[in-house]
Image (cartoon, rainbow, N blue to C red):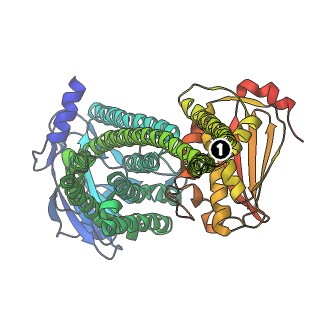
């Protein structure tokens, strides 16, 4: 509890002291005055700087924005106690490009430190916080000069800590940051699991956004494993993560809110900006200063654009928008403060420095909630669509059954009508063979009526089994049964059907789904033959198996499928004729998933081939017995 209270005090302390004067062995100094001078030439030496009097007053909480050349800071520390005192001069930020600390007494250099990202020591860049121990005898005074050179913003806080205070500071800060990144890692793993389970691109963009955000903040706070690099170039490679997380943030926003659906131009603009940021990330591998400067502007602009669009979408009843508005409000608040701090508009303190972490974390959590909610809505909609598709499948099967019955009944009904008409005519003209005519035509009526009854029973028997559970189905016999149901349609175009393969293979499946599937494929072939007026149409069905997989290949000689339509023929409403075009879509998206199978189409010489693949583990041994080589 004491550690938490200490850190809270550390965050919100803002009282400034005039100078650094040590009175006892326990005092640390977190707020004091310094002076700064801008050496635009970048060539002035320490000796030359010591002669300059035009240092501008500034607090030890530095927020100057980007500056050209070198910035020199100056302060002094005096020991007014009666004992020798040691204080650690400590800079809170570990990401200064190059910093040199000079300890001067009576215009003579007595101690110094060279640190920064561009400084190679012991085979790696210096990623730790610049810190230097300063020991003062009683009544001794030393001047501290800090030279900072960076192409980026000047943002840091300099303090004088006792050893005990510095240890507590580091412990609290490191513990809180590890807890912070541990929570982010847990969210990443959770959403990564969901991505591999659902395979939804929303999750991939979210993972990219959170991953690069975490890398950017690990690099910015110099936490393991990004607390050291083998070279400046390697450090730069990780620094581009600041650009990449904004790129993925922008692309994820477009996807999550379906912006392109509601506002196509705005959606396209944001996608282009996301791509532009990815390009900046690539450029940053070679030159980082310019991309970072551009991103500093876009980091404020793009979140506000997406927030405005989210508000507009909320007014249009977009259910996800409310999550986004709240999340983006947290993020925008933090990022505005962070942007103002790094631009030198507001002063550095622990609140302005770390508010962006709190806002970003709130955004990450709320985005995760929004993603889960959207997935739930999509799953509910998919379930509704599947239910509608199942109902449509039943109605389609029933409708096709009625149509086929109609085609089968036309000839016998005409025969019955002709027989009745024949009897009436013979009776009216008192034909001398009336009894014979009546007997012959009654027999004809009886035979045709029996045919009507058998045909109706045959079709309706198939429809009655539409909701029956899986059972063992003889594949060869069932294909013949479907061909028999479509007999008149086949005869109209003189379609020759050949079935190759074993005749005794049985698979355990829902018979009505398989029957409906084969009926759709047969009718699709018939429609194409009619549309193209193919002479001597032929349909060859090849049945074979391999292991637990069972294959039915349906080959025609109708001229094939246009190359641009090979994949599109299974899409909803795709049709080359006057039909609805839903048949093949229904086969692929509803019937085959029910049968645990899949279908592929490709062109062959003279026509097209559809390959239906089914899997049936229960009949593995039986299928192997019939395997064709």
Closest to the observer, 61 or 591: 591
Q: Is residue 62 visible?
A: no
Residue receiving disc 1: 434
Does 330 sit above or below residue 167? below
Q: Toward the viewer: 6 or 381?
A: 381
Which residue shows up at 63% across the image and 50% down it? 411
Q: Which quadrant of the figure has residue 622? A: top right
Q: Nearer the viewer, residue 553 or 593?
A: 553
Residue situated in front as seen by the camera: 55 or 330: 330
Q: Which SS class for mark 1?
A: helix
Query: For residue 296, which quarter of the picture?
Result: bottom left
Q: Is residue 329 left or right of residue 560?
A: left
Find residue 455 and report its horizontal and vertical position in percent: 63, 38
Identify the residue shown where x is 39% and y is 49%.
213
| Left or right side of 376 for 431 | right
Q: Is residue 167 above or below residue 110?
A: above
The quadrant holding residue 266 is bottom left
Classify mark 1: residues with Cα within 10 Å, few (<14), some (14-19) or many (20+). some
Q: Left or right: where does residue 45 sit relative to residue 534?
A: left
Residue 93, visible in the rendered structure:
yes
Quadrant for the C terminus, please: top right
Instruction: Say if 252 sits above or below 364 in the image.
Output: below
Location of the N terminus (image quadrant)? top left
Instruction: Please say if 357 is above or below 57.
Output: above
Residue 194, given in percent of the width and then of the height, sits at: 46, 37
């Amino acid at each position: 509890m004491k550690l938490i209270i200490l850190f809270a005090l550390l965050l919100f302390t803002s009282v400034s002291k005039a100078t650094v004067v040590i009175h006892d062995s326990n005092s640390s100094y977190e707020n004091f005055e310094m002076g700064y001078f801008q050496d635009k030439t970048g060539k002035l030496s320490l000796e030359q700087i010591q002669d300059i009097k035009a240092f501008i007053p500034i607090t030890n909480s530095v927020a100057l924005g980007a500056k050209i050349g070198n910035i020199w800071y100056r302060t002094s520390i005096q020991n007014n106690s009666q004992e020798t005192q040691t204080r650690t001069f400590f800079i809170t930020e570990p990401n200064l490009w190059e910093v040199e600390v000079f300890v001067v007494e009576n215009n003579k250099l007595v101690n110094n430190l060279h640190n920064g990202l561009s400084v190679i020591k012991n085979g790696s860049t210096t990623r730790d916080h610049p810190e230097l121990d300063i020991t003062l005898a009683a009544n001794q005074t030393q001047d501290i000069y800090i030279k900072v050179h960076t192409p980026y913003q000047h943002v840091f806080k300099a303090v004088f800590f006792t050893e005990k205070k510095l240890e507590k500071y580091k412990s609290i800060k490191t513990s809180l940051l590890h807890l912070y990144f541990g929570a982010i890692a847990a969210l990443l793993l959770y959403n990564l699991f969901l991505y591999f389970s659902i395979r939804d691109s929303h999750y991939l963009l979210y993972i990219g956004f959170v991953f690069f955000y975490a890398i950017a903040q690990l690099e910015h706070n110099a936490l393991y494993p990004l607390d050291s690099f083998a070279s400046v170039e390697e450090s730069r490679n990780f620094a581009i993560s600041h650009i990449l997380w904004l790129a993925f943030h922008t692309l994820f926003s477009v996807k999550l809110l379906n912006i392109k659906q509601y506002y196509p131009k705005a959606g396209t603009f944001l996608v282009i900006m996301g791509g532009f940021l990815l390009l900046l990330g690539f450029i940053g591998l070679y030159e980082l200063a310019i991309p970072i400067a551009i991103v500093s502007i876009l980091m404020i602009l793009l979140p506000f654009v997406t927030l405005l669009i989210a508000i507009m979408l909320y007014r249009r009843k977009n259910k996800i928008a409310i999550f986004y508005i709240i999340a983006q409000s947290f993020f925008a608040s933090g990022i505005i403060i962070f942007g103002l701090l790094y631009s030198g508009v507001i002063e550095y303190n622990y609140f302005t420095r770390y508010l962006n972490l709190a806002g970003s974390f709130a955004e990450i959590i709320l985005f995760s909630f929004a993603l889960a909610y959207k997935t739930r809505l999509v799953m509910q909609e998919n379930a509704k669509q599947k239910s509608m598709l199942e109902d449509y499948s039943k109605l389609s099967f029933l409708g096709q059954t009625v149509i086929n019955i109609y085609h089968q009944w036309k000839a016998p009904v005409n025969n019955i009508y002709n027989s009745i008409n024949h009897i009436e005519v013979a009776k009216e003209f008192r034909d001398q063979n009336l009894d014979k005519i009546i007997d012959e035509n009654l027999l004809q009526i009886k035979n045709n009526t029996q045919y009507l009854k058998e045909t109706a029973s045959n079709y309706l028997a198939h429809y009655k089994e539409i909701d029956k559970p899986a059972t063992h189905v003889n594949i060869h016999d069932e294909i013949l049964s479907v061909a028999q149901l479509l007999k008149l349609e086949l005869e109209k175009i003189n379609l020759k059907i050949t079935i190759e393969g074993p005749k005794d293979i049985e698979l355990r499946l829902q018979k009505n789904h398989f029957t409906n599937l084969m009926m759709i494929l047969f009718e699709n072939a018939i429609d194409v033959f009619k549309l193209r007026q193919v002479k001597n149409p032929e349909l060859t069905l090849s049945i074979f198996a391999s292991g637990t997989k069972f294959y039915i290949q349906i080959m025609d000689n109708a001229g094939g499928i246009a190359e641009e339509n090979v994949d599109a023929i299974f899409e909803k409403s795709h049709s080359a004729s006057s039909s609805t075009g839903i048949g093949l879509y229904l086969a692929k998206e509803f019937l085959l998933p029910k049968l645990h199978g899949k279908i592929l189409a490709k062109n062959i010489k003279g026509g097209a081939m559809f390959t239906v693949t089914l899997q049936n583990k229960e009949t593995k041994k039986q299928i192997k017995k019939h395997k064709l080589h």
